[in-house]
Image (cartoon, rainbow, N blue to C red):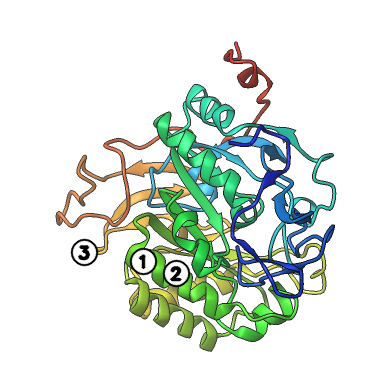
Amino acid sequence: MTPAGRPAPARWWRPLPDGRLACFLCPRRCRLRDGQRAFCFVRRRRGEEIVLDTYGRSTGFCVDPVEKKPLYHFLPGTPVLSFGTAGCNLGCRFCQNWTISRSRDTAALSEEASPATIAAAAAGLGCAAVAFTYNDPVVFAEYAIDTARACRAAGVATIGVTAGYVSTAARAEFFSAFDAVNVDLKAFQDRFYRRQALSGRGGLAEVLDSLRWLRRRGGCWLELTTLLIPGLNDTTTEIAALVDWVAGELGPETPLHFTAFHPDWKLRDRPPTPAAILRRARALARERGLRHVYTGNIHDPEGQSTFCAGCGCVLIEREGFRLLSWRLGPDGACPDCGKKLAGRFASRPGTWGGRRLPVDLAAFRTGRRPG
Protein backbone atom coordinates (compact mmCIF):
# COMPACT_ATOMS: atom_id res chain seq x y z
CA MET A 1 0.00 0.00 0.00
CA THR A 2 1.33 3.44 -0.95
CA PRO A 3 2.12 5.90 1.90
CA ALA A 4 -0.54 8.62 2.17
CA GLY A 5 0.21 11.83 0.32
CA ARG A 6 2.63 10.35 -2.23
CA PRO A 7 1.93 9.59 -5.89
CA ALA A 8 0.87 5.95 -6.22
CA PRO A 9 1.50 3.64 -9.16
CA ALA A 10 -1.74 3.60 -11.12
CA ARG A 11 -3.40 0.53 -12.52
CA TRP A 12 -5.41 0.03 -15.70
CA TRP A 13 -2.92 1.30 -18.27
CA ARG A 14 -0.80 -0.16 -21.05
CA PRO A 15 1.97 0.98 -23.42
CA LEU A 16 1.11 1.77 -27.04
CA PRO A 17 3.28 1.12 -30.13
CA ASP A 18 3.84 4.86 -30.62
CA GLY A 19 5.45 5.20 -27.18
CA ARG A 20 2.48 6.69 -25.39
CA LEU A 21 0.84 5.09 -22.35
CA ALA A 22 -2.93 4.53 -22.52
CA CYS A 23 -5.01 4.84 -19.37
CA PHE A 24 -8.07 2.61 -19.57
CA LEU A 25 -9.59 3.24 -16.15
CA CYS A 26 -12.48 5.06 -17.83
CA PRO A 27 -13.83 5.11 -21.40
CA ARG A 28 -11.86 8.27 -22.25
CA ARG A 29 -8.70 6.13 -22.66
CA CYS A 30 -6.34 9.10 -22.40
CA ARG A 31 -3.03 8.58 -24.23
CA LEU A 32 -0.10 10.20 -22.48
CA ARG A 33 3.46 11.18 -23.29
CA ASP A 34 5.96 11.73 -20.50
CA GLY A 35 4.78 14.49 -18.17
CA GLN A 36 1.27 14.70 -19.60
CA ARG A 37 -1.83 14.46 -17.44
CA ALA A 38 -5.08 12.69 -18.21
CA PHE A 39 -8.36 14.61 -18.56
CA CYS A 40 -9.07 14.03 -14.86
CA PHE A 41 -5.77 15.84 -14.11
CA VAL A 42 -4.89 13.62 -11.15
CA ARG A 43 -3.47 10.74 -13.21
CA ARG A 44 -0.21 11.54 -15.06
CA ARG A 45 2.60 9.86 -16.85
CA ARG A 46 5.88 9.70 -14.93
CA GLY A 47 8.56 8.07 -17.04
CA GLU A 48 7.34 4.65 -18.06
CA GLU A 49 4.37 4.49 -15.71
CA ILE A 50 1.15 6.31 -14.88
CA VAL A 51 0.72 7.52 -11.31
CA LEU A 52 -2.19 8.77 -9.20
CA ASP A 53 -1.28 12.07 -7.53
CA THR A 54 -4.17 12.09 -5.06
CA TYR A 55 -3.57 8.79 -3.30
CA GLY A 56 -3.97 9.54 0.42
CA ARG A 57 -4.96 13.16 -0.23
CA SER A 58 -8.50 14.25 0.58
CA THR A 59 -10.17 17.61 0.09
CA GLY A 60 -11.80 17.33 3.50
CA PHE A 61 -14.02 15.19 5.72
CA CYS A 62 -17.52 15.68 7.04
CA VAL A 63 -20.05 13.52 8.88
CA ASP A 64 -23.51 13.95 7.41
CA PRO A 65 -26.70 11.90 6.94
CA VAL A 66 -26.75 8.99 4.51
CA GLU A 67 -29.86 10.60 3.00
CA LYS A 68 -27.64 13.38 1.63
CA LYS A 69 -25.83 11.02 -0.78
CA PRO A 70 -28.78 10.52 -1.60
CA LEU A 71 -29.55 7.02 -0.33
CA TYR A 72 -33.01 6.45 1.15
CA HIS A 73 -33.04 2.65 1.27
CA PHE A 74 -29.63 2.03 2.85
CA LEU A 75 -29.37 2.31 6.64
CA PRO A 76 -31.72 5.31 6.92
CA GLY A 77 -31.00 7.93 9.56
CA THR A 78 -27.37 6.91 10.05
CA PRO A 79 -24.27 9.15 9.90
CA VAL A 80 -21.65 8.63 7.21
CA LEU A 81 -18.13 9.99 6.95
CA SER A 82 -17.90 11.68 3.54
CA PHE A 83 -14.77 12.59 1.62
CA GLY A 84 -13.40 13.12 -1.87
CA THR A 85 -10.27 14.20 -3.67
CA ALA A 86 -9.39 16.64 -6.44
CA GLY A 87 -10.11 15.83 -10.08
CA CYS A 88 -12.86 14.24 -12.17
CA ASN A 89 -13.15 12.33 -15.43
CA LEU A 90 -16.27 14.25 -16.42
CA GLY A 91 -16.50 17.89 -17.41
CA CYS A 92 -20.02 18.81 -16.33
CA ARG A 93 -20.73 22.46 -17.09
CA PHE A 94 -23.20 22.48 -14.19
CA CYS A 95 -20.90 20.87 -11.61
CA GLN A 96 -21.90 21.94 -8.10
CA ASN A 97 -18.59 20.77 -6.59
CA TRP A 98 -16.41 22.32 -9.31
CA THR A 99 -13.89 23.87 -6.90
CA ILE A 100 -12.94 20.29 -6.01
CA SER A 101 -13.63 18.28 -9.15
CA ARG A 102 -11.92 20.73 -11.49
CA SER A 103 -9.09 21.67 -9.13
CA ARG A 104 -5.64 21.86 -10.67
CA ASP A 105 -3.86 22.10 -7.32
CA THR A 106 -3.94 18.63 -5.82
CA ALA A 107 -1.81 19.59 -2.82
CA ALA A 108 -3.22 22.92 -1.65
CA LEU A 109 -6.76 21.60 -1.25
CA SER A 110 -5.75 18.35 0.37
CA GLU A 111 -4.94 16.84 3.73
CA GLU A 112 -3.19 13.53 4.15
CA ALA A 113 -5.39 10.59 5.07
CA SER A 114 -4.37 6.96 4.77
CA PRO A 115 -7.00 4.24 4.24
CA ALA A 116 -6.39 3.02 7.80
CA THR A 117 -6.85 6.52 9.23
CA ILE A 118 -10.15 6.99 7.40
CA ALA A 119 -11.45 3.63 8.64
CA ALA A 120 -10.38 4.41 12.21
CA ALA A 121 -12.02 7.84 12.07
CA ALA A 122 -15.31 6.43 10.78
CA ALA A 123 -15.40 3.74 13.46
CA GLY A 124 -14.37 6.17 16.19
CA LEU A 125 -17.03 8.68 15.20
CA GLY A 126 -19.76 6.02 15.19
CA CYS A 127 -20.40 6.26 11.45
CA ALA A 128 -22.28 3.44 9.76
CA ALA A 129 -20.43 4.00 6.49
CA VAL A 130 -17.79 5.94 4.61
CA ALA A 131 -19.04 7.73 1.49
CA PHE A 132 -16.70 8.34 -1.44
CA THR A 133 -18.24 11.50 -2.84
CA TYR A 134 -17.79 15.22 -3.76
CA ASN A 135 -15.81 14.18 -6.85
CA ASP A 136 -16.09 10.87 -8.66
CA PRO A 137 -14.25 8.00 -6.92
CA VAL A 138 -13.53 6.47 -10.33
CA VAL A 139 -10.55 8.83 -10.68
CA PHE A 140 -9.05 7.73 -7.35
CA ALA A 141 -10.02 4.08 -7.73
CA GLU A 142 -6.82 2.64 -6.22
CA TYR A 143 -7.21 4.83 -3.12
CA ALA A 144 -10.94 4.09 -2.89
CA ILE A 145 -10.43 0.33 -3.12
CA ASP A 146 -7.72 0.29 -0.44
CA THR A 147 -9.84 2.50 1.81
CA ALA A 148 -12.89 0.30 1.33
CA ARG A 149 -10.91 -2.75 2.39
CA ALA A 150 -9.74 -0.96 5.54
CA CYS A 151 -13.30 0.15 6.31
CA ARG A 152 -14.75 -3.32 5.97
CA ALA A 153 -12.04 -4.70 8.23
CA ALA A 154 -13.18 -2.14 10.82
CA GLY A 155 -16.86 -3.08 10.41
CA VAL A 156 -17.75 0.08 8.48
CA ALA A 157 -19.83 -0.04 5.28
CA THR A 158 -18.86 1.77 2.09
CA ILE A 159 -20.83 4.01 -0.27
CA GLY A 160 -19.84 5.13 -3.77
CA VAL A 161 -21.37 8.26 -5.30
CA THR A 162 -20.42 8.13 -8.97
CA ALA A 163 -21.46 8.93 -12.51
CA GLY A 164 -20.73 5.33 -13.47
CA TYR A 165 -18.35 6.34 -16.28
CA VAL A 166 -15.84 3.53 -15.76
CA SER A 167 -14.28 1.04 -18.17
CA THR A 168 -15.39 -2.57 -18.44
CA ALA A 169 -11.86 -3.59 -17.43
CA ALA A 170 -11.97 -1.72 -14.11
CA ARG A 171 -15.68 -1.98 -13.41
CA ALA A 172 -15.85 -5.19 -11.38
CA GLU A 173 -13.07 -4.34 -8.95
CA PHE A 174 -14.19 -0.72 -8.62
CA PHE A 175 -17.82 -1.46 -7.81
CA SER A 176 -16.94 -4.39 -5.56
CA ALA A 177 -15.44 -1.82 -3.17
CA PHE A 178 -18.91 -0.55 -2.23
CA ASP A 179 -21.86 -1.85 -0.24
CA ALA A 180 -24.14 0.78 -1.77
CA VAL A 181 -23.87 2.97 -4.85
CA ASN A 182 -25.74 6.03 -6.03
CA VAL A 183 -25.20 6.56 -9.75
CA ASP A 184 -25.74 10.03 -11.15
CA LEU A 185 -27.58 9.42 -14.43
CA LYS A 186 -27.09 12.85 -15.99
CA ALA A 187 -29.77 12.59 -18.67
CA PHE A 188 -31.24 10.12 -21.12
CA GLN A 189 -29.74 11.53 -24.31
CA ASP A 190 -26.26 11.29 -25.83
CA ARG A 191 -26.37 14.93 -26.89
CA PHE A 192 -26.61 16.07 -23.27
CA TYR A 193 -23.63 13.94 -22.28
CA ARG A 194 -21.57 15.24 -25.22
CA ARG A 195 -22.38 18.91 -24.75
CA GLN A 196 -22.95 19.28 -21.03
CA ALA A 197 -21.02 16.53 -19.25
CA LEU A 198 -18.21 14.94 -21.22
CA SER A 199 -16.71 17.67 -23.40
CA GLY A 200 -17.38 16.19 -26.81
CA ARG A 201 -17.47 12.46 -26.10
CA GLY A 202 -20.39 10.05 -25.76
CA GLY A 203 -21.25 8.62 -22.40
CA LEU A 204 -24.85 7.53 -22.03
CA ALA A 205 -24.27 4.04 -23.45
CA GLU A 206 -21.30 3.43 -21.14
CA VAL A 207 -23.23 4.57 -18.07
CA LEU A 208 -26.25 2.43 -18.94
CA ASP A 209 -23.92 -0.53 -19.40
CA SER A 210 -22.50 0.09 -15.91
CA LEU A 211 -26.02 0.21 -14.48
CA ARG A 212 -27.02 -3.06 -16.12
CA TRP A 213 -23.88 -4.69 -14.75
CA LEU A 214 -24.54 -3.32 -11.26
CA ARG A 215 -28.06 -4.72 -11.22
CA ARG A 216 -27.10 -8.14 -12.51
CA ARG A 217 -23.67 -8.75 -11.01
CA GLY A 218 -22.70 -5.89 -8.71
CA GLY A 219 -23.90 -7.26 -5.37
CA CYS A 220 -24.33 -3.78 -3.85
CA TRP A 221 -27.44 -1.72 -3.19
CA LEU A 222 -28.21 0.68 -6.07
CA GLU A 223 -30.06 4.00 -6.24
CA LEU A 224 -30.11 6.59 -9.05
CA THR A 225 -30.11 10.38 -9.14
CA THR A 226 -31.01 12.66 -12.05
CA LEU A 227 -30.53 16.42 -11.74
CA LEU A 228 -33.29 18.04 -13.78
CA ILE A 229 -32.08 21.18 -15.59
CA PRO A 230 -34.78 23.41 -17.12
CA GLY A 231 -34.75 23.22 -20.89
CA LEU A 232 -31.96 20.63 -21.11
CA ASN A 233 -33.16 17.27 -19.75
CA ASP A 234 -36.61 17.85 -18.24
CA THR A 235 -39.07 17.12 -21.05
CA THR A 236 -41.86 14.67 -20.44
CA THR A 237 -40.63 12.55 -23.35
CA GLU A 238 -37.11 12.22 -21.97
CA ILE A 239 -38.22 11.56 -18.40
CA ALA A 240 -40.66 8.89 -19.62
CA ALA A 241 -37.90 7.19 -21.62
CA LEU A 242 -35.54 7.26 -18.62
CA VAL A 243 -38.20 5.86 -16.30
CA ASP A 244 -39.19 3.09 -18.71
CA TRP A 245 -35.55 2.05 -19.08
CA VAL A 246 -35.02 1.96 -15.30
CA ALA A 247 -38.20 -0.05 -14.73
CA GLY A 248 -37.39 -2.51 -17.50
CA GLU A 249 -33.63 -2.94 -17.00
CA LEU A 250 -33.13 -2.34 -13.27
CA GLY A 251 -36.53 -3.19 -11.83
CA PRO A 252 -39.50 -1.14 -10.61
CA GLU A 253 -38.28 -1.03 -7.00
CA THR A 254 -35.02 0.73 -7.89
CA PRO A 255 -35.12 4.10 -6.07
CA LEU A 256 -34.85 7.12 -8.37
CA HIS A 257 -34.16 10.65 -7.08
CA PHE A 258 -35.06 13.71 -9.15
CA THR A 259 -33.13 16.68 -7.77
CA ALA A 260 -33.24 20.43 -8.37
CA PHE A 261 -30.55 22.30 -10.29
CA HIS A 262 -29.17 25.65 -9.24
CA PRO A 263 -26.96 27.78 -11.52
CA ASP A 264 -23.28 27.09 -11.01
CA TRP A 265 -19.85 27.07 -12.66
CA LYS A 266 -20.31 27.29 -16.46
CA LEU A 267 -24.08 26.92 -16.56
CA ARG A 268 -25.44 30.10 -15.05
CA ASP A 269 -27.88 31.04 -17.81
CA ARG A 270 -30.50 28.53 -16.67
CA PRO A 271 -32.94 29.19 -13.83
CA PRO A 272 -33.18 26.99 -10.74
CA THR A 273 -35.47 24.01 -11.25
CA PRO A 274 -39.04 24.84 -10.19
CA ALA A 275 -40.45 22.47 -7.58
CA ALA A 276 -43.36 21.78 -9.92
CA ILE A 277 -41.04 20.15 -12.47
CA LEU A 278 -39.70 17.73 -9.87
CA ARG A 279 -43.16 16.87 -8.61
CA ARG A 280 -44.34 16.32 -12.18
CA ALA A 281 -41.39 14.03 -12.88
CA ARG A 282 -42.07 12.05 -9.71
CA ALA A 283 -45.76 11.65 -10.57
CA LEU A 284 -44.91 10.53 -14.10
CA ALA A 285 -42.39 7.98 -12.86
CA ARG A 286 -44.87 6.53 -10.39
CA GLU A 287 -47.58 6.37 -13.06
CA ARG A 288 -45.19 4.42 -15.30
CA GLY A 289 -44.44 1.82 -12.65
CA LEU A 290 -41.53 2.91 -10.46
CA ARG A 291 -42.32 2.27 -6.79
CA HIS A 292 -39.82 4.53 -5.02
CA VAL A 293 -39.36 7.96 -6.58
CA TYR A 294 -38.07 10.95 -4.64
CA THR A 295 -37.54 14.68 -5.02
CA GLY A 296 -34.45 16.47 -3.72
CA ASN A 297 -33.16 20.00 -3.06
CA ILE A 298 -36.71 21.25 -2.45
CA HIS A 299 -39.12 21.17 0.48
CA ASP A 300 -41.39 18.22 -0.28
CA PRO A 301 -42.11 15.85 2.64
CA GLU A 302 -44.37 13.63 0.51
CA GLY A 303 -41.76 13.39 -2.25
CA GLN A 304 -39.07 12.48 0.28
CA SER A 305 -41.02 9.83 2.18
CA THR A 306 -40.99 6.11 1.48
CA PHE A 307 -44.22 4.25 0.70
CA CYS A 308 -44.93 0.53 0.72
CA ALA A 309 -44.84 -0.97 -2.77
CA GLY A 310 -47.59 -3.36 -1.73
CA CYS A 311 -50.33 -1.39 0.02
CA GLY A 312 -49.14 2.19 -0.39
CA CYS A 313 -48.89 3.14 3.28
CA VAL A 314 -46.14 5.45 4.54
CA LEU A 315 -43.22 3.43 5.92
CA ILE A 316 -40.58 6.14 6.43
CA GLU A 317 -41.66 9.75 6.71
CA ARG A 318 -38.99 12.36 5.95
CA GLU A 319 -38.57 16.08 5.83
CA GLY A 320 -35.34 16.98 4.10
CA PHE A 321 -32.67 14.71 5.57
CA ARG A 322 -34.55 14.08 8.83
CA LEU A 323 -36.63 11.02 9.63
CA LEU A 324 -39.99 11.95 11.16
CA SER A 325 -41.51 8.49 11.53
CA TRP A 326 -40.54 4.85 11.01
CA ARG A 327 -43.01 1.99 10.56
CA LEU A 328 -40.76 -0.78 9.24
CA GLY A 329 -40.74 -4.01 11.18
CA PRO A 330 -37.43 -5.45 12.38
CA ASP A 331 -37.35 -7.63 9.25
CA GLY A 332 -37.78 -4.61 6.94
CA ALA A 333 -41.41 -5.47 6.18
CA CYS A 334 -44.54 -3.35 6.05
CA PRO A 335 -46.56 -3.80 9.27
CA ASP A 336 -49.84 -3.60 7.33
CA CYS A 337 -49.37 -5.98 4.40
CA GLY A 338 -46.09 -7.75 5.18
CA LYS A 339 -44.32 -6.83 1.95
CA LYS A 340 -40.59 -6.31 2.45
CA LEU A 341 -39.18 -2.95 1.47
CA ALA A 342 -36.39 -3.15 -1.10
CA GLY A 343 -33.09 -2.03 0.40
CA ARG A 344 -30.78 -2.69 3.32
CA PHE A 345 -32.08 -1.74 6.74
CA ALA A 346 -31.08 -2.10 10.35
CA SER A 347 -33.63 -3.28 12.90
CA ARG A 348 -34.00 0.32 14.05
CA PRO A 349 -33.45 3.62 12.24
CA GLY A 350 -30.51 5.90 12.91
CA THR A 351 -31.02 9.17 14.78
CA TRP A 352 -28.40 11.40 13.17
CA GLY A 353 -30.91 13.81 11.65
CA GLY A 354 -29.79 16.53 9.25
CA ARG A 355 -26.59 17.54 11.03
CA ARG A 356 -23.34 18.32 9.24
CA LEU A 357 -20.14 17.85 11.25
CA PRO A 358 -16.76 18.82 9.71
CA VAL A 359 -14.00 16.47 10.88
CA ASP A 360 -10.29 17.06 11.44
CA LEU A 361 -8.49 13.75 11.00
CA ALA A 362 -5.33 14.92 12.80
CA ALA A 363 -6.17 13.09 16.03
CA PHE A 364 -6.89 9.85 14.18
CA ARG A 365 -3.60 10.09 12.27
CA THR A 366 -1.74 10.07 15.57
CA GLY A 367 -3.64 6.99 16.71
CA ARG A 368 -5.64 8.68 19.46
CA ARG A 369 -9.32 9.50 19.40
CA PRO A 370 -10.38 13.13 19.85
CA GLY A 371 -11.66 13.95 23.30
Q: Circle 1 sits on which residue?
A: 215
Q: Position of residue 150 (x, y in %)?
A: 48, 34
Q: Amino acid at mark 1?
A: Arg
Q: Amino acid at mark 3?
A: Gly
Instruction: Evaluate if marks 1 and 2 touch, with contact meaning CB atoms under 8 Å apart.
Output: yes
Q: Position of residue 174 (x, y in %)?
A: 50, 55
Callout 1: SS: helix
Q: Circle 3 sits on which residue?
A: 310
Residue 204 visible somewhere in the drawing: yes
Q: Circle 2 sits on which residue?
A: 211
Callout 2: SS: helix
Q: Position of residue 100 (x, y in %)?
A: 75, 50
Q: Residues within 10 Å of mark 3 (few under 14, many from 20)?
A: some
Q: Please report the residue visible at 67 percent of the width from the left and 33 percent of the height from the top.
A: 4
Callout 3: SS: loop
Task: Tell which circle, 2 or 3, labels the residue nearer the N-terminal end.
Answer: 2
